Amino acid sequence: MVYRKNRRGLQQCCWATCCYTLQIVKKCGGVILSSSNFIGVSLGTCNTYIYKRGRGIVLGEPSAVACDAYDESKIIAMGYRAKKMRGRTPETINVIFPINKGVIADFQKTVLMLKSYIERVKRNRWGLEIFIAVPSSATAVERRAASDAGIAAGATAVTLIEAPIAAALGCDLDIFDEKGQMIVDIGAGNTGISVLSLGGVAYSIKSDMCSSTFDNDIINYLRKNNRMLIGAETAEEIKIKLGSVLPGNTIEFMTVSGRDIVRGLPVETVVSSEDVREAMQASINGIIDAILYALEHIAPELSADIIKNKIHLVGGGALLHGWEELILKNTGIPAVVAPNPLECTAIGAGKANGLMRRIKSKNNPDPSASK
């Protein structure tokens, strides 16, 4: 489903009918908005990306807000500055991640964050239209919250696009092809597995195993095996430097600092890439199981299409080495990681705008006739 909102109210459309959704007339007070006042937004659990047509990705910042613990309207920092404060703040400062599993968990903080990010990339004060990517599993309330947040952040009109469709566009896939294409989005909040066909989502499931689960696995592994406590930031750093879903040709090592859980004193230990893979193995298996489940429950025709079109991996978790080989080994289907897995959803949201205009000019020569 696609929800579109301007300051006059909310409209609901169905993307599954592909061309009809893309024939929506984009108006602002009776004036069609120019592409220079359009941005595509990916509100992720961990990071927010903004795409501007003609300029590409113009912003990529953590979805984090640091505020006063006693007056949450008082913002201290956002983005990278706020994320670096996590685990280091006094009692007077809270670090909040207002997006959870791809949907808004804290509306006010999301509005403040999005407004700040938009102001950084907006070049003029004329009407601004936003495409926001939302999970296929988002409820009507969650979709409305995303629309309201966009309007409250300063947009004149907001259109919501399902995240797997945006990701497919960002991977340069033909979303209108009748042949099925599988998108696996290994995000920070969950892993979404979707099959697209004829411009819509033909099948979609999600798994709780995701990038942040890997971080928790590393924390728990070091607590159990090294009697050492580390924070989320350290766990993420370990995952980025040593993380892999398959054994590598060489074993890499990293010195990690934390706190001894018995003595309570600072301590250092050496962690290997094999330790990290062992820690994450259960979550890796969970994602593979979810992919297998999806393949077992889609139509046979779509299964045959996916063999030819491959499985496309997006999201931050897709950056872990070895996914293509592991998926091929377990499913027999080739897989490919998107060239820009972190940014492709925002890029796809940006491309949707140009696609709407192209489809309208082809199938709807008189835009004023559309509603």
Image (spheres, rainbow, N blue to C red):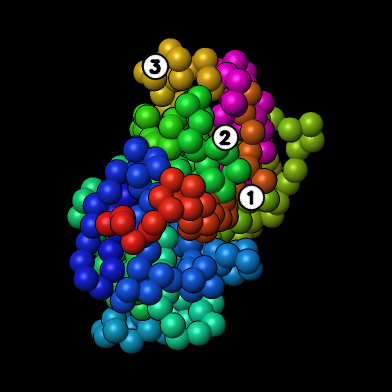
Name the residue that disc number 1 marks: 340
Q: Residue tagged by mark 2?
A: 312
Question: Is tag 3's residue or tag 2's residue first in the polypeptide sequence?
Answer: 3
Badge 2: residue crowd in 10 Å (few <14, some 14–19, many ≥20): many
Stretch of the chain drawn in magenta: 307-333
The secondary structure type at the circle numbered 3 is loop
Q: CA distance from mark 3 to mark 2?
A: 18 Å
Left or right: where 270 falls relative to 134:
right
Going by the numbered disc 2, the residue's amino acid type is: His
Q: Residue furthest top?
A: 300
Q: Amino acid at mark 3?
A: Ala
Q: Secondary structure at mark 1?
A: loop
> What residue is pinned by disc 3?
299
User: First in sequence: mark 2 or mark 1?
Assistant: 2
**How far across and down, in percent of the image, does residue 135 sit?**
36, 47
Is the N terminus in the top left, top right, bottom left or bottom right quadrant? Answer: top left
| Identity of the residue drawn at 64% across and 33% down | 336
